[in-house]
Amino acid sequence: MTKHVIYCIFAVCVSMGLLLLMIGMADSVPNAGGQPHAEHPGMVIGADGAARLAHIGSLAFMFNSLLLTLVVGLCVLGVSERYRSRKFLAGMGGSWLFMLMIWWMMFSTHQEFLLTGETDYFMGFPVPTAWQMYGTWLGAIPLIVMYSYGFRTFIYTREDEAEFDALLEQAARNSQQN
Amino acid sequence: MEAYRQEIIVGSVVIYMLFCVATGLWAMRRTRDSSDFFVAGRGLGPIVIALALFSSTLSGFGFVGGPGLVYSIGVSSFWMVVISSTGYAVGFFLVAKRIRMIAELRDCLSLPDVVAARYGSDAVRFLIALTIVLGVMGYLATQILAMAVVMQAILSGTETFANVGLVSCVVISSAVLIFYCVTGGIIASVYTDVVQGFIMMSAGSLILMTAVSVFDGGMQEATAIILADDSEAIMPFGSAGVMASLGWFFVFGLGLAGQPHLITKMMMNKKMSDNRSILPMSLFGYVMAALLWISIGIVMRAAVIDGIVEPLALPDDAASTFLSIFANPLLAGVVFAGLFAAIMSTSDAFLNIGTAAIIHDIPTALRGRSVENELLWARVVTVLLAIVAAGFALYSHYADATLVALLGAFGWGTFAASIFPVVAVGLNWRGATVAGAVTAISAALLINFVVQLSSIVPPYGISGPLVAFVTSMILFIGVSLITKQPELAPDIEDVLRI
């Protein structure tokens, strides 16, 4: 099934390209990239967050969802086909869902704030920002755990090591003959 | 102690620079050939690699430009930092194993060597080497200028050295950098990176503690002040908006695996199995050091809005103003040494890969072999490269910033767009073709150049590097799919299968 993961990666990249095009062609909003602070030179303000997301909010949400899919797809591509077991794919699927969940929480709590103007705080930051700050950082930890703890199972097994050592010996023999 | 603040800061920086010189002398005895000079004989341990990896990732930009960006555009710039876990994960999954295998199997000295072995193409080797040289010039010039500007700012606070000019500062800082890079090559570079890494981690964690104590209510009070002033600045996408933020996520996150000065270090570890510990250690180091970026920026924005601190003349003054107002002199000394460490650790990595591209990769691509006596030429070109970059830096400062700005466009984003598909994807997909690689690299260079030259500003904060990266990924895979599948060398076929 994962033999054709490159096609999925390609499809995701093309979709992201199309989304960029749609965002680029969407109705523009003045100062969508920020505007100078009225009192403090050098500072930029975002002003009306709801207006800035009005035409592109859902497109941007899809763009990042695809980006997270691309991240996981690339990690799958980085593992030899023979080690893409059900256990490995389940881990990757779980990591993907975990990252999507964090992204959804960040996006939806921000939307909620734009509607109500109220927010709680978590460890020093407004809740939507805490999802971004701590959540995004933690979002890829399952991938790192899979790499480190699964190193000898998925990444570079003892058999791989033996095979590579044999390759090196062969290369050494070849260079001696030449 | 407060009376000796400036002396303590100058003393810390001088001690740090003396350490760099001593490391260069020590490493010189261990550098016997070009393999030692460029890839440390592939004999480095996991802690050395981990610290070298993260300290090269976080350049002087992280210590000066980073807090300045948070001050200026709020949380938008967090996206450059919080993606580190994703970036390192993707980099290790895609690159760490196979680049190390090909490097050992084919005795590669540089990234273009690895690429040439993978694709069996000198055209791809040449394009990657060219991208590296262009990028290195821009990066090095800006790093050297930053180092000189900071040095001048520090010295201007003392009585004895108050009148030392910028040119002298460029000469002094470049001389130290050149000395340890020339004498000890990559061995000196990575061992200074180790100490540089420790200094940066200490600076990051100590600054966080200081920043939290500025307001009685801690970080929450600071963020509440910003929220009351402009809520978007402290919301997840910051003042620059959602697409600017997500663009940074893409370019800085995935792009990490396309940075030649970082992935070259993945060729240097002694044992492949060390990668399992290098990944979490690098990430931990980066997170600790990056605390400085976030905490100073937030606190300074809140402090200015609240009227505790006068508005800054420039956003980039955020870190130095914070240190002069809130930090203990000893901590300020550590952070300034950390700043030099951050700049030098990135600069030495660029000097090394730039030199390799000039004396090894481009000659090999053009005439089939490298120069004679590589070690000697490596040392000569390292000096010349640093001098030319220092010249660019001064020219940019005094005469015309366009040239360096243009070369600066060949920075992180261009490396990401040009190198990521060809290396990170190409090392894991045997269907990748020379035509795909050449098209992707050319398109990435072209788009970045055009966007920079024409000053095009895409809507909603979409950046040129983002467009270039997405385009190069599509072209790399698309063109590879429609062109003839390559015949790979048997050993490369085996490496791609393992």
Image: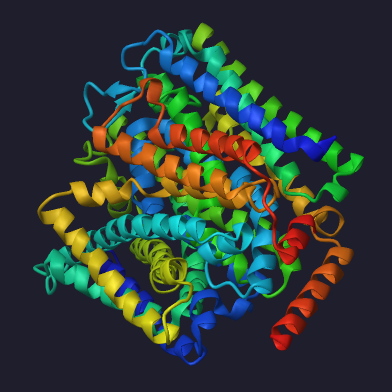
Q: Position of residue B456 (x, y in %)?
A: 29, 28
Residue in the foreground of this view, choosing between A129 and B275: B275
- Name which residue lies at 89% across and 43% down: A85
Location of residue B480 with respect to B271 vertically, above or below: above
Location of residue B147 with respect to B251 vertically, above or below: below
Q: Position of residue A125 (x, y in %)?
A: 53, 30
Q: Quadrant of the N terminus of chain B?
A: bottom left
Residue B288 placement, left or right of B275: left
Residue A93 placement, left or right of B317: right
Residue B92 placement, left or right of B252: right
Residue in the foreground of this view, choosing between B53 and B481: B481
- Name which residue lies at 15% across and 54% down: B397
Residue B179 placement, left or right of B352: left
- Name which residue lies at 39% across and 34% down: B464
Say if residue A5 shows up in the picture.
yes
Give the colour scheme shown. rainbow
Q: Quadrant of residue B496?
A: bottom right
Location of residue B162 with respect to A1 vertically, above or below: below
Residue in the foreground of this view, choosing between B414 and B23: B414
Residue in the foreground of this view, choosing between B47 and A17: A17
- Residue situated furthest front in the rendering: B484
Say if residue B256 shows up in the picture.
no
Q: Position of residue B244 (x, y in %)?
A: 43, 29
Q: Position of residue B493 (x, y in %)?
A: 75, 59
